[in-house]
Image: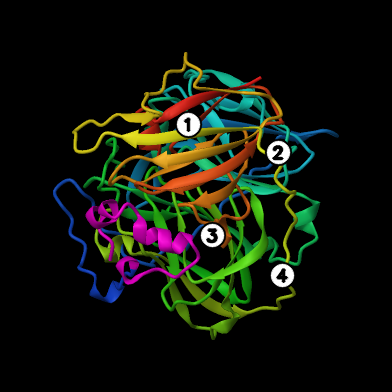
Amino acid sequence: MVTRRRLLGTGLAAAGVGLTGASFTPLLAVDPAKASPAKAGPSTAATPELFTRPMPLMPVLRPTFRTSTADHYDVTMRAVRKEVLPGIQTDLLTYNGHFPGATIKARTGRPVIVRQRNELDVATSVHLHGASVTQANDGDPMDTLAPGGERVYTYPNKQPHASLWYHDHAHHKESENVYRGLHGSYLLTDAIEDKLPLPKGEYDVVVAIRDAHFDAAGQLVYTMDDQQRSTLLVNGVPYPYFQVAARKYRLRFANMSNQRFIGLRLADGGEMIQIGSDGGLLPRPHTTDSFILSPGERADVVVDFSRYAVGHKVVLENTIIFAGNAEQVGQVMRFDVVRTADDPSSVPAVLRSLPALPAATNERSITLQMEEGVAHPKGFMDGKMYDPARVDANIRFGASEIWTVTNTNARVPHNFHMHLVQFRVLERGGKPPAPGETGLKDTVIVAAGETVKLQATFDSYRGSYVYHCHMLDHSAMGMMATMRIS
């Protein structure tokens, strides 16, 4: 298995094998049969029993009202107590009392307008991750909503289909607010996606994964850069089972953890077909037995359960062990095949066409770094901590730029997220992107010592937007900067 020490020591080098399209090396393999039993310390809740509770299907938020031009929603951020660990009520921060937040379903060309009310005792800022929106509606880290206040966010949905998500972004509090529950999914669709014979309806399922650290009373423990977040939750439940029919499913995986990288594979090594990433469908499907998601990344995957007999059960494993033992975090959930079903769906050989990249008008280099080996590390973008009064990159409206992003840390992995734009990965370590990174992206892994080259076109909105490491503990430490498009 990969321990955190070994993983950081290799700078996710072994994980990079998965990113280039090869299968995981033995370094990343987890053998649950050899895992040591979990131990509960004096300040840690007992490990939840595996696969005893069903995976909830995330509720779909219904509009408060619709007009001829837009869908209108009302959302209230409030503190609630809900059962996360069996038999224990845990204090959470939520959107409308849901953990995670309910899914918003939207359509390209039809705006969504959300009135957010903050009934919490902390300031918040709602960011629709991966969306192209005006500066006023982006959820800037400093553009916060005070306790007791409300504001309206308008999402024009002019971009193509994508599996987006929304979360808190109030600077210095984003890490804790998201950790305590302020996150949910936003699925944008369009005619391109509609016409494909992919699994739909009840066979198109959000699978939101994150980790947590519970104390002996079953309450969430938050500490910056905590390495004891060793309970995995799927749609808000630890280690659930999901009853499926013997047919194809579209599984929309999202890593909503603060800083945990997750390597996903079926325990029997069965194939999965990746059809999408952060910014929607890939140009062509990619068959694999495993894939990695860093915090904030998404992957749409089709799994055909018809290869299993009714009664068969297969575990979804996590192959990257940052914290906790293999039994606790080496397994994520279990699929239980319980019935047969008709299956008219299929995965076409071509999913979408992406336009050719325009000629680049500018190039720039970005470095990510955080202090290593200190008790309270600081994070840096190009050697500087985030300062909201400073503009770090001036970009001409309409420009198409190549950014070369380098992680200068020797041991610590990062990832990189840009607001406003979806980008294309050009190179990873000087090599072409892996099949799973050939589509539109808004978040990309940058392992220790690694360089990733990407291209983004800034032709949608003018204004100031941030870019940062999406390991939210790192951005809260200062690994964030501002770009101004004008």
Label 1 Cα neighbours within 10 Å, binned few <14 / some 14-19 / many ≥20: some
Which amino acid type is shown beneath numbered disc 3?
Answer: Ala
Q: Earlier in the sequence, mark 2 or mark 4?
A: 2
- Label pair 3/4, CB-CB below 8 angstroms: no
> Residue 192 in the image: x percent, y percent?
78, 54
How far is the residue under mark 2 from the one under mark 3? 38 Å
Pointer 2 residue: 63
Q: Secondary structure at mark 4?
A: loop
- Dividing the picture into quadrants, the one containing residue 385 is top left
Residue 390 to residue 442: above or below: above
Pointer 4 residue: 349
Instruction: Single out the mark in the foreground, 4 or 1.
Output: 4
- Label pair 2/4, CB-CB below 8 angstroms: no
- Label pair 2/3, CB-CB below 8 angstroms: no
Which amino acid type is shown beneath numbered disc 2?
Answer: Pro
Residue 94 to residue 270: above or below: above
Which amino acid type is shown beneath numbered disc 4?
Answer: Ala
Pointer 3 residue: 434
Label 4 Cα neighbours within 10 Å, binned few <14 / some 14-19 / many ≥20: few
Residue at image point 44% right, 50% down: 294
How far is the residue under mark 2 from the one under mark 4? 35 Å
Q: Quadrant of the N terminus?
A: bottom left
> Residue 265 in the image: x percent, y percent?
44, 68
Pointer 1 residue: 78
